[in-house]
Image (cartoon, rainbow, N blue to C red):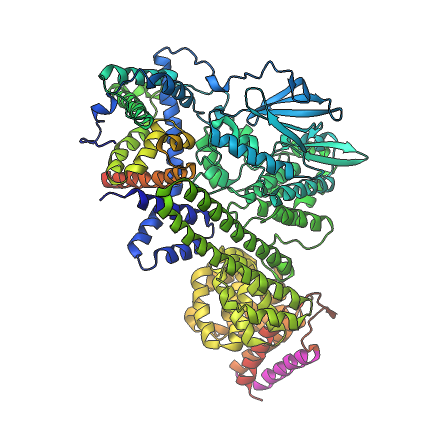
């Protein structure tokens, strides 16, 4: 999965699937998964980005007529779509920020959401050196899946997934640090 | 270069175990054993471990950003508020009967489920609380684990823990519990309304600790200890706490994984640093100890160490950051800073005068609270029992364990610590074995990881053996203290000191054994202990070490047995412990470094310490401080100043005999330096006479001192020896 040729582009055919058969089963699952708790402090305003998933699905299903190879395949694709939506949104936001007059910047909307971009860039690198770690990050962070779901989807044990997630986070973070040192 | 799946599995397994080792030295040893001579791989893993903490923070912030951006996208698309997700719909809401229970009223919601008051009709009629757990029915693993957990809960049988009577499943298949219906007030409110004074609060707190200890012994961690989960009632004139809401629901709730490292469970103000750190460390029973510490803090001061009400709307990553970095104010400091009005209210809620409240909290109680709130769990009380014991000892006016190292506190401390070291290692083995069994059974392709796990298990076994040896030696030290010397010797023969890695936990053992050997004239044995103590102390905060007597003991032992080694020791001490922070520490450092002749370089390095110490008469031990000052001038060649300092010390009414003898020896050395051999000889004779009369005992104002420090006389003897060589005869 996730072989990309360019630094910040996601390969188009990652999104080119469809299946009327698998859709109802997985869509229900996706809706639920999308309902991740955002944080404890805001426990009572749980955000359920069903619409996001829907948008992801639209992108997926209108692309062309490929068939889902597996549930894993679908979740990968969905997570990639989410990744793209989030990354696009943050990019648009930072472009807007650059073109806006300085005095209007303190309205709180255009805060720095650069983590999403940094993760995106370095995930592309990680995919090349450690595909399994990269997959866990993709499904966890962009897909919003919990360890149990990832275990179900990838056929590993929960314990193994969690171990890999802890490992992958540290590895990805190292890549991000290296990038930033290079820039300085 | 691509990492293969198996390599990845193995690396992550190593990382997981390494992270679970809190003690940096142990972690280092572990990595050395795992990687052997593969230095580059070890380096890489070390860097990865270093990145774990930053990574946790980074991803937490990233999650918050993701939430924010998602919210923005949704709002821009005018998405309707999403409906409740299908599987969490409360499809049992219309229930009025569950097995033998008739649901009467909904009591509340939280902690992963809804709680009802219910009436049981068969076999006995009673009121119970029924909690229906919110769990994803599609998640079979979660349901299976849930089953295991409820069996564990049923094992708990303690008067201060709400009992679990029964468990079952609702018609739709969700698990429920029938529990003892607890009526009562949350502990903090109860204490304030009933105006319980500090002693009564502590007694109540001890009951809570005991109950938590019971749960821990059954292998259950509460994870969410806070006032609202401890309800207190008055029964037959006694205050009876009941702990509710143990572990399960939070684990199985919300369909998330039990150990999800990126999920928060619990209430931030009461959570332990490792609970919020999310670097992948498994939370253990010591996390509950921290929460108990927060509770104790609140019972005493009316506030939690991190007061969330001060900053109401912060993100979780900010709370996490402050939990990980904040410096806790001692309870007495916090109280002292409160405006008089607030303090008066607090005192009133405790039925005490403000002055009494401050005096009660200051000192030992501060130490107890701070030890429970140690950020590093290896420095915390290791068990709820340990915490309770200290509180009880405080109430009985006995010395407590949570003090900086000093002789009086040593024995209880190392016995407890080592009992735990043993238990912790055992726990690690169990965790690894369980993990091993599950993974190996489930997936063939994890077989290779499993083999690696087995190897890791053996490493853990080695750690356990060491802990075992350590506990045996603790036992030996205990026997020594009881005068059972033969038994102790036998144990020490079987478990040589060299089988123990020097660590903070071992320090107390080394100290006690070293002292005992010194007191009993076994200098060669003592020196081994002190060498190990020296190694172990390197892992502690330097200023904390300086606060105790360890350095002086090591210095005296080395000088007595092996003066060459002392000089090396002195250099290291100067490097590591200067500048001293505070009078007492400066005084200690001067004495440690100047007890033997020193060249001008050494003396010059200590100039700042003399300033820090200031006037000896204003230090806690004026006579010894005067002695330190006299040593400084003696070694610097200033006999006049040195004699003045000696006079100061000899005039101090609370000087000990050992100190007096030491001072007289310095007087002798000064006179000899000025060529006044008669005066020198007279002073030396006085010093010898005192030592002779005392014959190993020590006196203060003519009364024997309650506690003898062997190195006080070791200092005097060293000084007398030096003076004898100088004066002759």
| Quarter in which the N terminus of chain B is drawn | top left
Task: Please identify the quarter of the rendering in which residue B442 is found.
Answer: top left
Vertical relation: B723 (above or below) B422: below
Q: How many marks?
A: 0
Could you say which is closer to the camera, residue A14 or residue B97? Answer: B97
Q: Residue at x 29, y 29 (%)?
A: A117
Judged by its main secondary structure, the magenta piece is helix
Could you say which is closer to the camera, residue B343 or residue B81? Answer: B81
Q: Residue at x 22, y 32 (%)?
A: A3
- In this image, B87 relative to B486: left or right? left
Q: Residue at x 45, y 25 (%)?
A: A37
Magenta segment: does it hold B680?
A: yes
**Range of residues picked out in magenta:** B675-693
- In this image, A109 relative to A180: left or right? right
Q: Residue at x 55, y 88 (%)?
A: B728
The residue most toward the right is B236
Q: Position of residue B709 (x, y in %)?
A: 63, 68
Q: Position of residue B338 (x, y in %)?
A: 62, 35
Q: Position of residue B607 (x, y in %)?
A: 46, 63
Task: Please identify the quarter of the rendering in which residue B560 is found.
Answer: bottom right
The residue most toward the bottom is B729
- In this image, B350 relative to B521: left or right? right
The residue most toward the left is A5
Magenta segment: does it hold B5?
A: no
Q: Position of residue B143 (x, y in %)?
A: 51, 30
Could you say which is closer to the camera, residue B56 or residue B351? Answer: B56
Vertical relation: B312 (above or below) B582: above
| Quarter in which the C terminus of chain B is drawn | bottom right
């Amino acid at each position: 999965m996730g072989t990309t040729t360019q630094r910040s582009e996601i390969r188009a055919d990652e999104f080119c699937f469809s299946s009327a058969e698998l859709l109802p089963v997985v869509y229900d699952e996706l809706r639920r998964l999308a309902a991740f708790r955002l944080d404890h402090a805001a426990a009572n305003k749980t955000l359920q980005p069903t619409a996001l998933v829907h948008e992801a699905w639209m992108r997926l299903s209108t692309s062309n007529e490929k068939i889902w190879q597996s549930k894993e395949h679908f979740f990968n694709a969905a997570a990639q779509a989410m990744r793209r939506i989030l990354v696009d949104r943050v990019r648009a936001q930072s472009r807007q920020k650059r073109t806006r007059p300085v005095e209007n910047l303190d309205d709180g909307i255009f805060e720095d959401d650069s983590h999403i971009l940094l993760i995106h860039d370095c995930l592309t690198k990680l995919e090349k050196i450690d595909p399994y770690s990269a997959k866990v990050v993709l499904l966890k962070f962009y897909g919003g899946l919990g360890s149990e779901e990832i275990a179900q989807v990838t056929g590993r044990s929960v314990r193994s997934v969690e171990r890999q997630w802890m490992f992958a986070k540290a590895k990805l973070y190292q890549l991000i640090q290296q990038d930033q040192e290079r820039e300085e | 270069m691509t990492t293969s799946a198996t390599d990845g599995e193995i690396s992550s397994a190593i990382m997981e175990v390494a992270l679970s080792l809190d003690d940096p030295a142990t972690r280092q040893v572990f990595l050395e054993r795992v990687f052997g001579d593969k230095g580059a791989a070890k380096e890489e893993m070390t860097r990865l471990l270093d990145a774990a903490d930053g990574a946790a923070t980074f991803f937490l912030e990233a999650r918050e950003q993701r939430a924010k951006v998602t919210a923005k996208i949704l709002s821009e698309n005018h998405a309707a508020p999403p409906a409740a997700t299908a599987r969490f719909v409360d499809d049992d809401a219309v229930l009025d009967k569950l097995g033998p229970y008739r649901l009467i009223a909904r009591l509340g919601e939280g902690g992963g489920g809804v709680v009802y008051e219910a009436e049981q009709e068969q076999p006995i009629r009673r009121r119970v609380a029924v909690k229906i757990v919110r769990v994803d029915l599609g998640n079979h693993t979660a349901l299976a684990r849930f089953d295991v957990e409820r069996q564990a809960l049923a094992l708990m049988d303690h008067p201060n823990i709400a009992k679990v009577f029964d468990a079952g499943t609702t018609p739709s298949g969700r698990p429920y519990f029938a529990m003892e219906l607890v009526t009562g007030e949350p502990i903090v409110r109860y204490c304030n309304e009933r105006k319980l004074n500090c002693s009564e609060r502590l007694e109540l707190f001890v009951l809570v600790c005991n109950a938590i200890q019971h749960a821990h012994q059954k292998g259950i961690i509460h994870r969410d200890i806070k006032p609202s989960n401890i309800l207190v009632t008055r029964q037959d004139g006694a205050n009876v706490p009941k702990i509710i809401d143990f572990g399960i629901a939070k684990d199985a709730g919300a369909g998330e994984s039990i150990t999800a490292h990126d999920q928060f469970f619990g209430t931030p103000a009461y959570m332990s640093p490792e609970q919020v750190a999310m670097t992948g460390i498994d939370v253990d029973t010591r996390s509950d100890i921290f929460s108990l510490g927060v509770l104790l803090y609140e019972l005493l001061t009316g506030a939690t160490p991190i007061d969330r009400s001060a900053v109401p709307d912060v993100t979780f990553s900010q709370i996490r950051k402050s939990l990980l970095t904040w410096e806790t104010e001692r309870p007495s400091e916090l109280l002292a800073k409160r405006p008089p009005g607030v303090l008066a209210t607090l005192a009133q809620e405790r039925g005490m005068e403000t002055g009494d409240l401050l005096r009660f909290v200051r000192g030992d109680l501060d130490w107890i609270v701070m030890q429970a709130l140690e950020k590093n769990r290896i420095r915390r009380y290791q068990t709820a029992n340990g915490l309770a014991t200290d509180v009880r000892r405080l109430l009985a006016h006995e010395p407590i364990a949570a003090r900086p190292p000093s002789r009086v506190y040593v024995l209880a401390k190392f016995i407890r610590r080592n009992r735990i070291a043993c238990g912790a290692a055992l726990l690690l083995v169990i965790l690894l074995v369980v993990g091993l069994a599950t993974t190996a059974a489930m997936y063939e392709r994890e077989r290779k990881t499993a083999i690696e796990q087995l190897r890791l298990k053996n490493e853990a076994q080695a750690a356990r053996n060491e802990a075992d040896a350590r506990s045996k030696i603790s036992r030996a030290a205990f026997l020594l203290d009881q005068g059972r010397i033969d038994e102790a010797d036998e144990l020490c023969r079987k478990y040589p000191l060299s089988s123990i890695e020097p660590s903070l936990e071992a320090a107390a053992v080394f100290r006690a054994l070293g002292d005992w050997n010194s007191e009993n004239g076994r200098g060669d044995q003592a020196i081994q202990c002190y060498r190990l103590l020296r190694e172990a102390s390197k892992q502690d905060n330097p200023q904390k070490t300086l606060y105790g007597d360890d350095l002086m003991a090591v210095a005296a032992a080395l000088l007595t047995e092996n003066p060459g080694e002392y000089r090396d020791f002195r250099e290291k001490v100067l490097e590591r412990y200067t500048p001293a922070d505070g009078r007492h520490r400066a005084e200690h450092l001067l004495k440690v470094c100047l007890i033997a002749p020193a060249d001008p370089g050494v003396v010059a390095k200590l100039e700042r310490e003399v300033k820090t110490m200031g006037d000896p008469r204003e230090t806690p031990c004026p006579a010894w401080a005067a002695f330190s000052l006299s040593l400084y001038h003696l070694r610097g060649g200033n006999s006049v100043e040195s004699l003045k300092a000696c006079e100061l010390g000899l005039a101090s009414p609370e000087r000990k005999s050992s100190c007096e003898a030491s001072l007289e020896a310095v007087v002798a050395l000064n006179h000899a330096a000025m060529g006044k051999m008669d005066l020198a000889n007279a002073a030396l004779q006085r010093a010898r006479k005192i030592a002779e009369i005392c014959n190993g005992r020590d006196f203060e104002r003519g009364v024997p001192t309650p506690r003898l420090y062997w190195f006080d006389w070791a200092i005097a003897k060293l000084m007398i020896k030096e003076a004898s060589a100088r004066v002759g005869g």
